[in-house]
Structures are given as C-alpha cells and as structure tokens.
Image: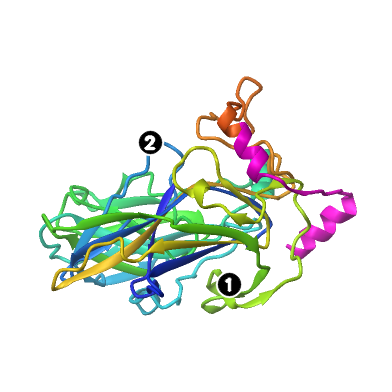
C-alpha cells in the first residue's frame, strides 16, 4: 500500500477526465487490488508531500501529509571522504551522488556516509530533512547468496546526530530506503537534535543514489481539502514494452520512454491465469482480494472524473497523489513461486507462500471473481538453458 505524489502539472484533465496508465514493463506478475486518485488542495504558500520510503507491511497506511514551507538547501553536504556533494544535491535534476565503491553483489556497496549541515537556524514547526533519490535493489538470487555466506552483511541506513561531547550517536535506526525510483524520504528531526550542532550523518552500504537534499519546516494548522476520486472506468489490454534507458546517465535509474514502445515480448511467459482483457473497473474500487492480475506487456487504462473535485479557492493549488494497494512478484529463479501466478495473494495471509492452513478466500463471491476475470491462461515450459538465456537477457 502506498501513496505516490504525481509531479504538479503532470496530470491534466482532458474531456472532463484524468487518465492514468499502469504498465507492466518487467519480468513479474502484478496484482492491483485498489487504485484511487487523491486531490489535495492547499494554499500556494505551502507544499504538500508524503514520505515515499520503503516500509515493511504493518499497520494500515494512512495519507500522512506534510505541509512544508521554507524549503531550502542545507548549508553543506559532504561524504565520508570529505567530497563536496552540493553540486549534485542542491536541485532535483537527476545528477546523483555516487562517490562509493560497488561491491560484488547488485545493490550492496562499500559503506558510504552522507554528512549534512542543516544550518544554525531551523525555524518553527517540525524540522524536516527531505531526501530525494532512488535505490538499486538486490534481488531474490542476491539475497539467497548473501544469506548463505558470511562475507557480506547489509547495513540499512542509520541517521546519527552529534551528542554534547561532539560524538556521533544513532538517532534514527530505521531510516529505511526510497521505495523505488525518484522517491522522497521525509525525515522528521524534531526533538532529535540535542545540541546547537545541527550536523546529521546517514551511513549505509545499500546502493542508494541521492538526487536532492533539502531542509524544511512544517506550516502549523495549514488548511487542506482532500477529495478521494475512485475510477469511473478501467480497462486492461496488451500494450508491449517501453524503451528502457538510464535517466541521468550511468548513475541514474532505469526509466521508461512511454512514447517508444515495442510490441514484441521482452520476457518469457509466466505460467497461470491472468485477468482477461477488457473492463475491470469493478476490481479497483476497494481492497477486497479481487484484483487485476497483469502479465509483462499489459497495460491498465484508468479514468477519473475531473469534475468530482471542488473548485479551487483563490490563492490555492492542487496536488495529486496516487493510492494503490496490491502486490508485485518478480520471476527471479529464487523468488518463491516466481514463475507462476499462483498462489494468489490475499490481505489476511501471514506470509508468502502461505501455509497449508491458509488459503485464498473460497467463498461464493471470490469463486465468481476468479471464474469471471482470471481466464487468460499462459503456459511456460522451463529448461536449464531457458533459465540461463533469460538470466543473460535480464
């Protein structure tokens, strides 16, 4: 479950509708249970952001908005080698800080530090450190290899502050990572800075590429109007695969050019029953374990009523957040049941693959759902050579 901020101005009404396209570009199965468009209206003197870091499944996800003001660059940013990183981190421009050594595993590097001087004056309200960037993740095969050996340990990001003796001490041990590409991590430092030395240090060996570091405060009692829009129509069809490139050069994330599409299959088929093509709007209205199952190359076109949100008061602006609830399962050879659609996930499961004591709901409504929608069947026959060739292609 997550909220993703759509860049302001990127979503424009056409013929009274907002349109969103969900594409499945990778070698994976996606299960999309609910999608909603959330319009957040607020005075133009502040901005509205959400924390887009990765968090493990836990309590229900809420729209925790930060009304930010006085957003500014920090006084300085250096790494553990003393390298000045402000040229790369002043603006969100896809110029990334990458002064670390890559390790033998994808997603794991040498330990690297980011040392930020927030400045002497932090203002009123909550003190926020805002980090925009992306993570190059490990995959299932890398995780298995790390777990079977002792030469590499993953060090998740930790944020340190200076104590009264001038020594670093951990202040946030569960800082986590950006939840994908071009994501914003919002760190609330209120009450964490015990002295007038406002330096903070982030240390990790996860392959994170930061694009921008900012400091902000929150606006107290800033008014907002929130309107949740559910889809008016949704339709699944085959589209193909967007051209993939590195946005920002060698250190940028893999990006997709929607205007440049190839119809030919890019991956070997994943076995199982996917959602049949056509109208799927009923599947996106709530989180009910009745979802769209997309295969590589599929696209879901989702339309929302642009007139459902109220008119903007004078001096206000509107931000959009896309809410989604669902699962992704890649087809890595070490992913549990990665080569098949089943077993179908559901919200009440305690793990995946789930135990024999658990099973996907078998009541009449869910049986009708699977019989009506999950009828597009694909087959897959694997050999060792297939696996080798697919790995080289990936």
- Pick the front one: 353 or 77: 353
Residue 121: percent from left, percent from top? 12, 65
- Pick the front one: 323 or 214: 323
Query: What is the secondary structure assignment of the residue under circle 2?
Result: loop
Q: Residue at x 88, y 50 (%)?
A: 384
The residues bearing labels 1 and 2 have C-alpha atoms spaced at a distance of 32 Å
**Badge 2: few (under 14), some or many (20 or more) residues near its Cα, within 10 Å?**
few
Query: What is the secondary structure assignment of the residue under circle 1?
Result: strand
Circle 1 is placed at which residue position? 256
Residue 4 is a magenta residue: no
Q: Image check: 44 left or right of 139?
A: left
Residue 32: percent from left, percent from top? 54, 49
Span shown in magenta: 367-394
**Badge 1: few (under 14), some or many (20 or more) residues near its Cα, within 10 Å?**
some
Q: Image check: 286 left or right of 266?
A: left
Check whether the beta carbons of the residues at disc 1 and disc 2 lie within 8 A of each other. no
Q: Image check: 32 left or right of 94?
A: right
Quadrant of the image for the C terminus?
Answer: bottom right
- Pick the front one: 239 or 55: 239
Residue 78: percent from left, percent from top? 36, 69
Answer whether residue 206 is visible to the viewer in this image. yes
Pick out the residue farthest to the top.
357
- Which secondary structure is most common in the magenta stretch? helix
Q: Is residue 308 above or below residue 336?
A: below
Circle 2 is placed at which residue position? 59
Residue 393 is a magenta residue: yes
Q: Residue at x 35, y 66 (%)?
A: 306
């Amino acid at each position: 479950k997550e909220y993703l901020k759509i860049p302001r101005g990127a979503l424009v009404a056409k013929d009274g509708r907002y349109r969103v396209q969900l594409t499945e570009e990778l070698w994976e199965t996606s299960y999309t249970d609910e999608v909603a468009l959330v319009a957040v209206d607020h005075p133009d003197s502040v901005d509205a952001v959400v924390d887009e870091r990765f968090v493990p499944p836990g309590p229900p996800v809420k729209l925790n908005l930060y009304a930010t003001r006085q957003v500014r660059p920090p006084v300085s940013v250096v790494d553990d080698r003393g390298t000045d990183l402000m040229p790369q981190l002043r603006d969100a421009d896809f110029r990334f800080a990458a002064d670390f050594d890559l390790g033998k595993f994808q997603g794991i590097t040498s330990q690297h530090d980011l040392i930020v001087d927030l400045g002497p004056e932090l203002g009123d309200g909550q003190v926020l450190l805002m980090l925009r960037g992306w993570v190059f993740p490990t995959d299932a095969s890398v995780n298995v290899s790390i777990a079977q050996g002792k030469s590499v340990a993953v060090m998740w990001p930790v944020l340190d502050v200076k104590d009264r003796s001038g020594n670093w001490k951990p202040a946030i041990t569960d800082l986590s990572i950006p939840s994908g590409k071009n994501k914003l991590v919002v760190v609330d430092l209120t009450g964490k800075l015990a002295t007038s030395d406002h330096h903070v240090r982030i240390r990790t060996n996860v392959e994170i590429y930061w694009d921008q570091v900012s400091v902000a405060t929150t606006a107290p009692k800033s008014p907002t109007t929130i309107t949740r829009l559910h889809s008016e129509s949704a339709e699944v069809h085959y589209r193909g695969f967007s051209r993939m490139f590195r946005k920002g050069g060698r250190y940028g994330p893999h990006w997709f050019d929607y205007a440049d599409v190839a119809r030919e299959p890019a991956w070997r088929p994943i076995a199982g029953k996917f959602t049949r093509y056509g109208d799927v709007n009923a599947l996106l209205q709530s989180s009910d374990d009745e979802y769209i199952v997309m295969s590589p190359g599929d696209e879901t076109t989702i339309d929302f009523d642009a007139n459902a949100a109220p008119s903007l008061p004078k001096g206000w602006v509107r931000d959009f957040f896309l809410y989604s609830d669902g699962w992704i399962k890649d087809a890595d050879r070490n992913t549990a049941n990665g080569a098949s659609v089943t077993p179908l996930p559901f919200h009440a499961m305690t793990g995946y693959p789930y135990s024999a004591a658990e099973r996907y709901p078998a009541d009449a409504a869910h049986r009708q759902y699977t019989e009506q929608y999950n009828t597009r069947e694909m087959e897959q026959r694997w050999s060792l050579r297939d696996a080798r060739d697919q790995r080289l292609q990936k």
